[in-house]
Image (cartoon, rainbow, N blue to C red):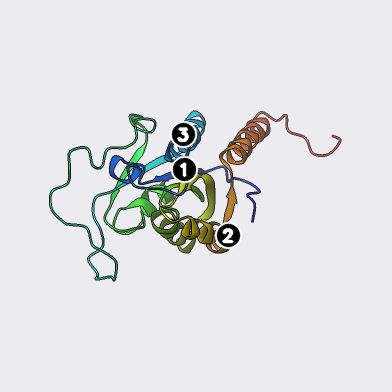
Amino acid sequence: MTISSLDPKTALILIDLQTAVLALPSAHPMDRVVENAGTLADAFRLHDLPVVLVTVAGGAPGRTEGVRRSGGERPAGWADLAPRLDGHPDDYRVTKHTWGAFTGTGLDEYLKGRGVTQVVLCGVSTSAGVESTARHAHENGFNVALAIDAMTDSNADAHHNSVTRIFPRLGETGTTAEIIDLLEHGVAQNSSIKNGSFKHGGE
């Protein structure tokens, strides 16, 4: 479903936009993904809404048929965030060791402790970190929105499957511009209500 609204307490969660991940092949230009994610982060910070920066530092231990990367020492800067996103002192940092950002990180407690009822997700990769976090957010009772032009995957088919088949079952999807427009509209409306100047219909 195309995004229709944002809750007054909505948080932005950016998934794995870090040096090692950004260097991988991707179905969509990574520079555009990072820029759109940064634009969303700027807008959320401007309106004093939480921004969560997630990085990955390992993987779940279970065996899979996929090739497992070495657990040895990683290169310097491996987990550094893209400069476009880093450096804001009020952002909440999460380091995860699974695909999803909720497992074993305290993210659920952080968000609910601040009254957050909705999350907007973006990042890499669409079918893994983003989708897994979206599933957990949905199961944990959050309204979910997904910025589809601020995410990508190494596989175009996997990205398409998540966006068209999975995400509509978990929440609403929209572009960076659509989400910011709703954010601006909601903040203006809430401000008008607080100031007693919001009126219904022809009042």
Tell me residue 118's x, y (percent): 52, 50
- What's the mark number on residue 12? 1
Between 78 and 133, the one lying in front of the other is 78
Q: Residue 80 carries which label?
A: none
> Residue pushed farthest right?
202
Image disc number at residue 164: 2
The amino acid sitting under disc 3 is Glu
Residue 107 percent coordinates (x, y): 36, 51
Mark 2, residues whose alpha carbon is within 10 Å: few (<14), some, or many (≥20)?
few
Residue 144 at x, y percent in the picture:
53, 54
SS class of the residue under badge 3? helix
Image coordinates for residue 198, horizontal then vertical, percent? 73, 33
158 or 56: which is nearer to us?
Answer: 158
Residue 35 - label:
3
The CA span between labels 2 and 1 is 21 Å
Identify the mark nearer the N-term, 1 or 3.
1
Quick one: label 3 or label 2, which is nearer the N terminus? 3
Q: What is the C-alpha distance between the residues marked 3 and 2?
A: 23 Å
* Residue under the point 29% across and 71% down: 65
